[in-house]
Image (cartoon, helix red, strand yellow):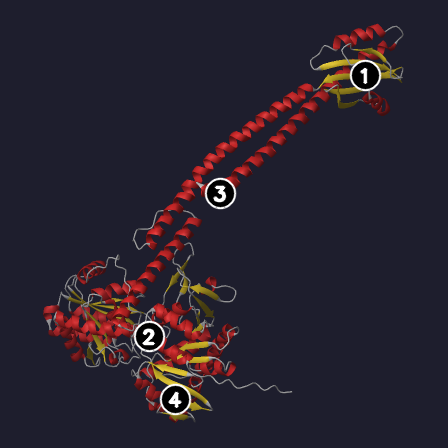
């Protein structure tokens, strides 16, 4: 009740104040109207008497005047009438008038002076009167004045009555509005807030209850959203604390988001982490709806999957190319916005590229040149001078943006990502020698003979050596890079500590196997379908029949071994017809880089190959291969992971391939089989997968059979060992080790010598 009164009392005071002002206005208006009416009636009466009295100014007419004023003096509210001569002496006067009016009043003198009627209100013996005087003439000369006296006390009576009624109305209105306001405040504010407070109290005490219902509206929507976030954070904090307690009890050392946040806070000394990547974590695109609304999508990218937990942990800044159709509409005047949309935790800074720059830098040099060069996937790399010029230009644009973001940060820390920014470390380091710069190369690094194909290998290697730390997925890629340095540039390669000293600057080269965020704290209240239930639901949605599902999740890229995978499935079904109408392979293929002719043709090849194989085995609703050619969200993909009997990762060459680790992390039931290419970096850690050579179709088909017929006990044992590896070597551990090594590097900043 006290809270309601705090809200309502100001309203009561405001209503009472306004009501009193209105009552005062009514009283004033009523007094003015009544006075004007009385003045008008007095003037009309005086003018009508003027015509009668003026002829009576002849000698001997005084008695007639007296009878006349006595007769008219009996009217309502009329106090009396008096006629004065030119000297001001009374010629005739109503008997009831006070003696003071035996001589003419001031109004009569003023009327004579003005030669027109004049009236005024005055008080005589506590009686309010209205006096109106009108000059009288005889033979065109001033002969005297006629004065009409009205009793004005009725005006005060009427005004008092109006004041009483107005105050009574104000009181009634105030009471009614107060009662209604109290009811509405309790109904719309106090009661919902009380329910919300009780709900938060139950959460604080560790009890789990659904959130209370609150009225619809902007304020309550925001309140409900923030309270829900608070409740979720509280639940997450409890789960993290419980997990940390379990780890302490078991003497385990597991990296979590909270542990990474604390570690980075200490190591970064509350400085923001700057990340540069070509791909942005969130894109804004115009919706297909007619209302021209904007949708937010998460691009299909292993890099995004890996890096966002790091940014969430340290409130950093992600600098990326803004490629969404509505990206410009979402940023502020400095091309920044806070993300994720539902819970802003770090800053996204967007860089704008022209179509020519994007074509030359991204599609041209990076993905028609460096990508096939490093993956050795038997696709000829293409190097064009114009593409190289665009690559240099865009690296400079990103470096300028990075330096702009770093302006107010002392000894900043930069983590550049991938082969798109080989020149950026040198550019940033030369401008900010005090910065700690690392770059992580997400794709393989080939042997020096292969990398030597690139016409600008020297410039690329020199740009990378501007970094203080270069990270690769596996040790062999580090070895290949150091061998390339030996051949490409003049530098001292220190193989004993895996470092390169070029022109006095030391660059460390280390392997950091990247990973995913392990779902350590799944909500127990969340109902998750079993593999069989999820499989049945997916088959129904896809309109197919099948009791066994395989899954592949890839960008449609020629390095992923998708065609080899399809041919192995064809060989498997051909060799084991008993799996017809039982086993279906679902390939989730997000179209990628279709501006590049090789990718465009490859997508057509994949579609054609799936159609050819399906045509070989027609059987009603059953299909051996279901190709889903669109981007899928993480939630959609997780359903296929949980439902699949096996997952195929058949990369022809890959830096790591996080699909393998995502599949393992998603299998909380310890079921399912991972078939993994030996040419993927993940094969160095997940040795309990069925390792295959994707070029060997027969071996791959045999692995599919073995996976489908593997005893449950063996599945569980293998999956548990792989899950333990992914759990311990998660993305937080990757980020912690990489950034820890970076922050421990001593930076010797040369002293600036001022030239006189």
729 to the left or right of 166: left
Which quadrant is the N terminus positioned in? top left
- Compute the Cα span from label 2 to label 3: 52 Å
Q: Which residue is drawn at 35% across and 59% down?
A: 234
x, y percentage for residue 118?
79, 23
Q: Earlier in the sequence, mark 4 or mark 1?
A: 1
Residue wearing tag 4: 499
Q: Which residue is drawn at 60% across and 30% down?
A: 23
Q: Within 10 angstroms of label 2, few (less than 14), some, or many (20 or more) residues?
A: many
x, y percentage for residue 523?
28, 60
Residue wearing tag 1: 100
Q: Within 10 angstroms of label 3, few (less than 14), some, or many (20 or more) residues?
A: few
Q: Earlier in the sequence, mark 1 or mark 2?
A: 1
Which quadrant is the C terminus positioned in? bottom right
Kindly report which numbered mark, 2 or 3, lies closer to the viewer in this rendering.
3
- Confirm or deny contact between disc 2 and disc 3 (CB under 8 A): no
Residue wearing tag 3: 6
Task: Give residue 733's mark.
Answer: 2
- Compute the Cα span from label 2 to label 4: 22 Å
Q: Quadrant of residue 647?
A: bottom left
581 to the left or right of 123: left
Query: Element at badge 1?
Result: helix
- Compute the Cα span from label 1 to label 2: 110 Å
Please say if 617 is above or below 383.
above
Please say if 353 is above or below 62.
below
529 to the left or right of 428: left
- Confirm or deny contact between disc 1 and disc 2 (CB under 8 A): no
Query: Element at badge 4?
Result: strand
Q: Quadrant of residue 67?
A: top right
Task: Give residue 291's mark.
Answer: none
- Compute the Cα span from label 1 to label 3: 61 Å
Along the line of sight, which residue is nearer the eye, 597 or 374?
374
């Amino acid at each position: 009740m006290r809270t309601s009164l705090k809200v309502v009392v100001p309203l009561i005071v405001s209503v009472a104040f306004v009501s009193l002002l209105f009552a005062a206005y009514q009283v004033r208006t009523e007094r003015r109207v009544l006075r004007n009416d009385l003045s008008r009636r007095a003037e009309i009466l005086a003018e009508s008497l003027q015509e009668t009295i003026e002829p009576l100014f002849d000698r001997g007419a005084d008695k007639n005047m007296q009878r006349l004023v006595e007769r008219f003096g009996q009217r309502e509210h009329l106090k009396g009438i008096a006629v004065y001569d030119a000297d001001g002496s009374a010629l005739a006067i109503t008997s009831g008038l006070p003696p003071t009016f035996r001589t003419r009043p001031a109004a009569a003198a003023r009327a004579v002076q003005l030669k027109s009627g004049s009236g005024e209100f005055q008080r005589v013996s506590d009686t309010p009167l209205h006096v109106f005087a009108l000059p009288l003439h005889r033979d065109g000369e001033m002969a005297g004045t006629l004065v009409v006296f009205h009793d004005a006390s009725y005006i005060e009576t009427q005004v008092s009555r109006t004041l009483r009624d107005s105050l009574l109305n104000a009181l009634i209105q105030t009471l009614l509005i107060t009662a209604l306001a109290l009811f509405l405040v309790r109904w719309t504010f106090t009661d919902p807030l009380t329910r919300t407070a009780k709900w938060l109290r139950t959460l604080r005490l560790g009890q789990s209850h659904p959130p209370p219902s609150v009225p619809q509206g902007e304020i309550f929507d925001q309140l409900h959203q923030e309270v829900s976030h608070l409740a979720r954070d509280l639940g997450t904090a409890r789960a993290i604390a419980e997990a940390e307690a379990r780890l302490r009890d078991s003497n385990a050392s597991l990296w979590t988001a909270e542990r990474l946040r604390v570690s980075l806070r200490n190591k970064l000394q509350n400085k923001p982490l700057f990340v540069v990547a070509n791909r942005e974590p969130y894109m804004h695109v115009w919706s297909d709806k007619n209302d021209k609304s904007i949708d937010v999508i998460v691009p299909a990218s292993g890099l995004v999957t890996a890096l966002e937990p790091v940014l969430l942990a340290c409130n950093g800044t992600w600098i990326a190319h803004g490629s969404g159709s509505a990206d410009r509409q979402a940023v502020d005047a400095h091309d920044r916005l806070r993300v994720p949309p539902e819970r802003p935790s770090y800053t996204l800074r967007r860089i704008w590229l022209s179509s020519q720059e994007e074509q030359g830098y991204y599609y041209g040099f990076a993905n028609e040149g460096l990508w096939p060069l490093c993956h050795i996937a038997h696709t000829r790399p293409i190097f064009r001078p114009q593409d190289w010029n665009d690559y240099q230009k865009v690296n400079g644009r990103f470096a300028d943006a990075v330096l702009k973001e770093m302006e107010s940060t002392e000894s900043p820390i930069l983590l550049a990502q991938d082969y798109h920014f080989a020149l950026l470390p040198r550019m940033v380091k030369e401008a900010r020698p005090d910065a700690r710069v690392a770059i992580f190369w997400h794709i393989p690094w080939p042997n020096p003979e292969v990398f030597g194909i690139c016409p600008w290998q020297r410039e690329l290697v020199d740009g990378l050596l501007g970094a203080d730390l270069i990270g690769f997925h596996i040790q062999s890629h580090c070895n290949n890079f150091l061998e390339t340095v030996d051949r490409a540039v003049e530098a001292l390669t220190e193989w004993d500590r895996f470092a390169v000293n070029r022109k006095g600057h030391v660059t460390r080269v280390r392997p950091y196997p990247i990973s995913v965020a392990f779902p350590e704290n799944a909500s127990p209240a969340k109902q998750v379908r079993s593999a069989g239930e999820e499989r049945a639901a997916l088959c129904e949605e896809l309109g197919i029949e099948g009791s066994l599902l395989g899954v592949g999740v890839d960008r449609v890229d020629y390095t992923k071994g998708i065609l080899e995978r399809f041919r192995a499935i064809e060989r498997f079904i051909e060799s084991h017809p008993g799996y017809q109408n039982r086993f279906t392979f679902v390939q989730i293929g997000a179209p990628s880089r279709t501006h590049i002719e090789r990718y465009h043709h490859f997508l057509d090849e994949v579609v054609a190959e799936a159609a050819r194989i399906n045509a070989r085995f027609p059987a009603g609703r059953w299909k051996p291969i279901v190709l889903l050619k669109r981007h899928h969200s993480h939630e959609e993909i997780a359903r296929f992971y949980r439902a699949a009997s096996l997952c195929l990762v058949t990369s022809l060459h890959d830096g790591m391939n996080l699909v393998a680790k995502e599949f393992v992390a998603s299998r909380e039931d310890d079921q399912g089989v991972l078939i993994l290419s030996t040419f993927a970096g993940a094969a160095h850690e997940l040795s309990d997968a069925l390792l295959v050579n994707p070029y060997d179709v027969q071996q791959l088909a045999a692995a599919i059979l073995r996976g489908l017929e593997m005893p449950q006990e063996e599945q569980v044992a293998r999956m548990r060992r792989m899950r333990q590896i992914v759990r311990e070597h998660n993305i937080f551990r990757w980020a912690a080790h990489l950034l820890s090594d970076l922050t421990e590097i001593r930076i010797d900043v040369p002293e600036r010598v001022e030239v006189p």
